[in-house]
Image: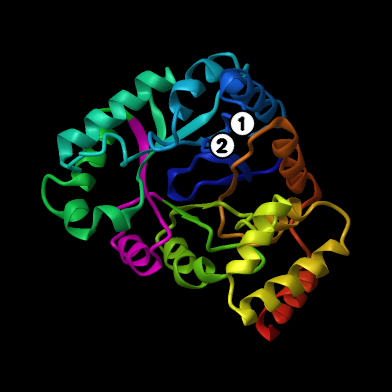
């Protein structure tokens, strides 16, 4: 496993990290067992950064005992938002949410505390005095977290938030993979200019993982988008390795990115994408070919 610096936080994080949204697996009765197995294997593979959220079902609750038994420490990031449903994003509510997350996770301090989906919160509730940003600052000052960040798919608002310089990290998702460079073009340059840690989530974009999900996603695209995506996918099938691993290696070629987060639901999935770090970034020539195919449609 290779490591990169999480922007101005100075933290060294594994370039493949673990996302907590699907750790429970497909069998609710084995959710605790599955979570523990994935976390333990991730630690063995050298993964040291984990991203979760109260909005990810039982993720935080299940991660608590799993982290205690992992054998190696993780840098844990979580988010504020979605739970409770009536969260007002005022300063004290943000701090209380993070305190609740720490209790569930059974840790004393977060690596990063993030606002979950800034578009759903809105500029005013984040930036106004006594709002969510002040809550994150208060949490950092109190030692509840080392750094503060933002997450979203809402590219224009996310880019505007990045440009304030107030946040240490940014998490983009679904908008950076071999069939989409939206986040790379609109958010990542601004974040790099601010020396922010940059986390890329959902790198499979529902196109590079399960066959069933890929079929549904392709069917929902326009004719041109479907043609472009199919051309990229078919070209990658000619390369050795899985489509998921190719998606990770594609993003890893971007030196501005700090870590690529895997939503692994089982041990096999985290082993597969961790191999991307061993293999190294995708060659520039192949990236250029994929982007030509994507542009051609």
Tell me, yes or no, whether the highlighted magenta stretch contains residue 42: no
Answer above or below: position of 89 versus 234.
Answer: above
Taking depth in this image into account, of 140 and 42 the one nearest to the observer is 42
Q: Position of residue 110 (x, y in %)?
A: 40, 30
Taking depth in this image into account, of 247 and 138 the one nearest to the observer is 247
Q: Is residue 98 left or right of residue 246?
A: left
Q: Residue at x 11, y 49 (%)?
A: 129
The quarter in which the C terminus is drawn is bottom right
Q: Which residues are magenta?
A: 145-169
Total label count?
A: 2
- Under circle 2, the secondary element is loop
Taking depth in this image into account, of 228 and 40 the one nearest to the observer is 228
Q: Is residue 136 left or right of residue 101?
A: left
Tell me, yes or no, whether the two marked residues, 2 and 1, touch with CB atoms within 8 Å: yes
Label annotation for residue 22: 2
Label annotation for residue 184: none
Residue on which disc 1 sits = 25
Image quadrant assignment for residue 160: bottom left
Image quadrant assignment for residue 73: top right
Q: Is residue 173 left or right of residue 285?
A: left
């Amino acid at each position: 496993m290779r490591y990169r610096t999480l922007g101005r936080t100075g933290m060294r994080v594994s370039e493949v990290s673990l996302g907590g949204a699907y750790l429970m697996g497909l069998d609710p009765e084995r959710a605790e067992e599955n979570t523990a197995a994935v976390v333990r294997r991730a630690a063995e593979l050298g993964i040291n950064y984990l991203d979760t959220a109260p909005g990810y079902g039982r993720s935080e609750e299940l991660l608590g005992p799993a982290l205690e038994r992992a054998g190696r420490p993780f840098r844990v990031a979580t988010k504020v938002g979605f739970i409770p449903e009536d969260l007002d994003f005022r300063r004290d509510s943000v701090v209380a949410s993070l305190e609740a997350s720490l209790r569930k996770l059974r840790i004393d301090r977060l690596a990063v505390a993030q606002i979950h989906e800034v578009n759903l919160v809105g500029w005013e509730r984040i930036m106004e005095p006594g709002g969510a940003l002040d809550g994150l600052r208060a949490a950092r000052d109190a030692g509840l977290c080392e750094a503060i960040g933002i997450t979203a798919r809402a590219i224009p608002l996310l880019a505007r938030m990045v440009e304030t310089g107030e946040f240490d990290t940014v998490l983009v998702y679904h908008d950076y993979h071999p069939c989409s460079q939206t986040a790379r073009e609109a958010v990542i340059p601004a974040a790099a200019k601010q020396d922010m840690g940059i986390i890329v989530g959902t790198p499979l974009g529902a196109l590079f993982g399960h066959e069933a999900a890929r079929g549904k996603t392709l069917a929902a695209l326009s004719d041109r988008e479907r043609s472009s995506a199919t051309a990229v996918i078919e070209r990658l099938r000619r390369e050795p390795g899985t489509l998921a691993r190719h998606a990770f290696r594609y993003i890893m070629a971007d030196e501005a990115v700090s870590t690529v987060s895997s939503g692994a639901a089982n041990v096999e999935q985290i082993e597969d994408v961790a191999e991307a770090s061993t293999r190294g970034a995708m060659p520039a020539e192949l990236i250029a070919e994929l982007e030509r195919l994507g542009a051609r449609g």
